[in-house]
Image (cartoon, rainbow, N blue to C red):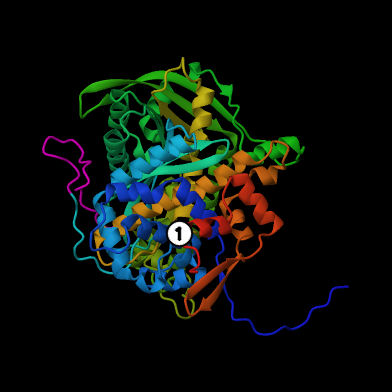
Amino acid sequence: MDFTWYGNQTPLEGRNCGPLALIVPLLERMNLEEIINRHLPPDPQAEFPHGKVLSLLIAARLFSPVALSNVAAWAAESSAEFLWNMPHEKINDDRLGRSLDAFFTQRHSILATIALHVSREFRVPLRDVHYDPMHILLCGAYEEAVARETRYADGTIRTDDALSPAHITTGRATDDAPRGSLMIHAGVCTHVDRFGPLPFFGHTIDGNQNGRTAVGEQFALWQKYLPFTKVTMISDRGTFSAGHLRRLTDAGGQAICSAPWDEFQALFDGQRRTLKWKTASYLSIEQQRRRTAASELPQEHYELAEVPHELHDLESGRKISSRVIFVFSTADQKVVRRQRQKQIDKLRAGLEQIQKSVSAGRRGTDPESVQRRVGKLFGTKEAARYFHWELKPLTAGERKQLPKPERGCKCPAHRFSFSFEGALVTSDEQYDGYSVLVATVPKSQSSADDVFTRFKQQSYSEQVNSEFKGPLAVRPVFLHSPQRVEALVFLMMIALTLYYLLQRQYRQAVPARATQKERRTTTLTLMRAFANYTLLIHHTRLGNEVQTTQLTARQRQILQHLGFPTPAQILRRRLPRPPE
């Protein structure tokens, strides 16, 4: 039996290095400092180059997101000051801010260079690109923020590094963005394969711009900084337009994009009787589980039918050859009908309540009040179009025949009635579960089934965006200028690449015989394994002596899978030897 006892006090100080044991070697392999320093020549008066300062800031956002003014305290607590050989007393928000200002001037070039290096170093092809914009909320007042000019006089999109920062302004209200919220949008390009997503390029857009503008600006930047890669851009219906397809076609690229149903409903109606439907091979993870586990839950599926179609681009006057793929989902059909019926029931109950109030002569039953109540009830609900209502004044004879009003009520002066258009519901039901994809990928290269499978990987882009807003804590943001906001967002795109690259490298190294759970290990799981890893600091009259602690078996296994050096090896290279 082992005994535990209290020992003497030690002069050693423990500092939680944590996931820096993973972040530091991956930053080195991404060649981040060297790439940034190549684009941002050092100031002769600066004590530390921009690459060192900004790589430290990226590590801080990945480790534990803090404000710029708190990075120095974090560097001391986490021992990052030793790993970067940068005393925490010299890590202040002015130094970080100056590096952000410098980074802003070369943000697109640096991001593209890192993307190309990651593509070569980690063998990630830049072919299928999933694009998805998202909003980023900001705090404070930015009086310097103005709408930027994104096009030259000839109409071409600006792509130079002198492009002003995205306009911080009010955008469309959403569930997590109340009306009047200040925001910008950030678009992220993501590669997806069997190892999961890997975001690697992106840009920012004004807070009041839409998806069509976003994808146009993103592709212009792609052509400017990654011109030799022929890309297939995959995006959602908010980015769809004939102009988007034309731009990609002219550049030798391809598009796979969902499109608004109302723009293709007429084509669907004209072709419906002759469409040849085939069951799609794609199944969600849940549907795969239901089939392998013989679950009693419904087994849903997709059906596909395609037709060739020409789109007219109004801007250029040209016609774009495309493939329109109609998609039918048994699950979506059930969901849409269930949601519609839920709305119908809620609206009918609300109208009946108003009808009772009016017939009883209660307060708030005058025409203006009734109009306001119905408007609030209907709101933006699509099912409101199935109902029609009217408020008719009662004649003197009709009012005399009414019973005596209840206490607190008055004699009704109007009759409220409503009707329900069931035939309109039946008409809408014929389109339940249908959606549409538009692709310029030739049929000889990819079948409709393959195009649909590639498009369904778009869900990974939404996962990337949630990580961008969540663990990396990119919002809410408050900095002193729009330029620094934009620089920080671009810096976070690099952090996002590192975040997903870490789990990708681990999944690639895991043996094929490993469990499914091990093969799907996430970055969060890997970082948690190092959550308590500690460095020991011995303060001496000559300086600080840094000692590493012993790795656990799991920590050592992770580093071996990733091919990373141990913290001891990193410190041995980064810190000088003790004085004689």
Residue 260, located in which quarter of the rendered image? top left
Q: Is residue 7 above or below residue 280?
A: below
Instruction: From the viewer's side, name the closer residue of 165 and 559.
Output: 559
Residue 87, located in which quarter of the rendered image? bottom left
The span picked out in magenta is: 149-170
Mark 1: amino acid: Ala
- Residue 51: x, y in percent? 35, 54
Residue at x-position 21% and y-position 43%: 160
539 magenta-colored = no
Residue at x-position 61% and y-position 55%: 525
Instruction: From the viewer's side, name the closer residue of 348 and 222.
Output: 222
- Residue 562 as seen in the image, left or right of residue 172: right
Residue at x-position 26% and y-position 67%: 480
Is residue 336 visible in the rendered image? The answer is yes
- Residue 485: x, y in percent? 30, 59
Seen from this angle, which residue lies furthest right?
1
Seen from this angle, which residue lies furthest front?
580
Q: Which residue matches tag 1?
A: 59
- Residue 279: x, y in percent? 60, 24
